[in-house]
Image: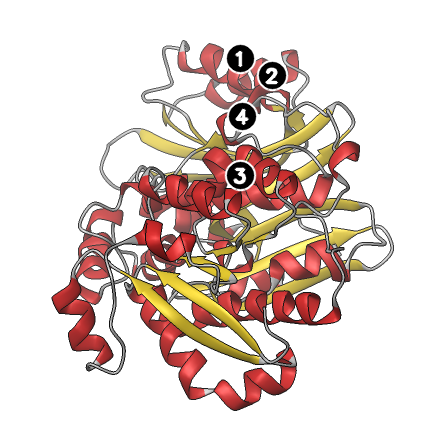
Amino acid sequence: MSSKVLNVAIVGLGTVGRGTYNVLNRNAQEIARRAGCEIQVKAVVVRNLITAQEFLQNSFQPTTDVDTVIADPNIDVVIEVMGGTTVAKQVVLKALSAGKHVVTANKALLALHGNELFETARKHGVALAFEAAVAGGIPIIKALREGLTANQVQWVAGIINGTTNFILSEMRSRGASFHEVLKEAQALGYAEADPTFDVEGIDAAHKATILASIAFGVPIQFDKAYVEGISQLQPEDIRYAEQLGYRIKLLGIAKRAARGIELRVHPTLVPTKRLIANVEGAMNAVMVRGDAVGTTLYYGKGAGSEPTASAVIADLVDLARLLSSGTKGSVPALAFQHDSLSSARILSIDEVQTCHYLRMRVADEPGVLADITRVLADGGISIDALFQKEAEDGQNQTDIIMLTHEALEGAVRSAIQRIEGLPTVLNKVILLRLEQLQD
């Protein structure tokens, strides 16, 4: 880097790449004042030259040759915003190995290959920055890695997928089914034609995995995460939760426990009095509980062209400041020093202890409730709240809805198996989890 200019290459000119290019140009003077130098886009690498030229309006000549760009000694930073985990991995590894700093918005790439990529960056003395990989424009990575560094983080819980939050918000406000709202989300552009990554919780799990590593100083372990989406969620459970004083949100949760680390994504009942329970539409929010600071909340747009570009450029400014200072030191990628990462175990879902929501359809006859509560008591599971609702679509049937006190999920699942074996229980028991997220 020259003393006055940081030269960058953008690899990928989709939604985030275009946003990054636009914001860098529109706010060039303000960014330079903060960075201490000018940040210039010197190369743009794309697959489709014609589409890129239309966007750039001939003010800049894009290329398809990423290897030449990486080899260019004048390029200081490679911005990877192409997405995917195959070609993108090759590009990032080549750039890091060539001594280039890399900024990425690619949460899937980091969740699946982050350990290898961070080790490569460390080996070659360069930075791999990724603020944009989680929650778009919300600076949650910086908050965890720097602002809360004095704290022992106890838990992180977040709405980190806007598509599912939009769907759940619409299901709650209108009483609509999942499939009905999903079609609307696709028509509005909130959901992809194939929405699997979003609605089955995979996207949120990628992000939760990254947050867990930074919060607790553990290696990235996406394969150990418990992942459950919202595609099977029924409108009646959203309605019953509301009657009990809760809202259902798809949360990514990372929590420190006595026997290890909890890492899970699933629909979760949250008390309506919590701010995060009132986050609606496609917005994101993340709560962090630290032993010194207490509970903090980070809210904003979790996706989109310019919100994500905001985070990409924040990483660029950090790199510019570091390079202009002439120092090699930087904040460790996962907040903790490389040789201090913990070997704490990621717990299985059966080892997680939390409260549970149970709903079951039963025959409306004497003794049914007594049989069910006896099974729960035998499993050491106590009931916190319970009510019955006459089934709208069946005679002599009723829905029993209950909340348990904290219990191991393995014990709850074993009890459910026994309950489902009772002749008066007419369908599969619906199981959801509940988090108080107390201040």
Looking at this view, is 299 or 426 the one in front? Answer: 299
Residue under numbered circle 1: 414
Q: As drawn, is 339 to the left or to the right of 55? A: right
Q: Examine the rendering and report whether any part of residue 434 can be seen.
A: no
In the current view of this chain or complex, which residue is farthest to the bottom? 29
Q: Looking at the image, which residue is at 44% across and 70% down?
A: 309
Query: What is the crowding at mark 1: few (fewer than 14 residues within 10 Å), some, or many (at least 20)?
Result: some
Applied colour scheme:
secondary structure
Q: In the image, residue 418 lies at what x, y percent?
A: 48, 10
Give the secondary structure at mark 2.
helix
Numbered disc in front, either 2 or 4: 4
User: Disc 1 vs disc 4: Cβ atoms closer than 8 Å?
Assistant: no
Q: Which of the marked residues, 1 or 3, is nearer the chain's N terminus?
A: 3
Could you say which disc has been placed on residue 224 in the image? Answer: 4
* Spatial separation of the CA atoms under disc 3 and disc 4: 19 Å
Q: Which of the marked residues, 2 or 3, is nearer the chain's N terminus?
A: 3
Residue under numbered circle 3: 117
* Spatial separation of the CA atoms under disc 2 and disc 3: 39 Å
Q: As drawn, is 64 to the left or to the right of 273? A: left
Question: Where 61 falls versus 355 (above or below)?
Answer: below
Numbered disc in front, either 2 or 3: 3
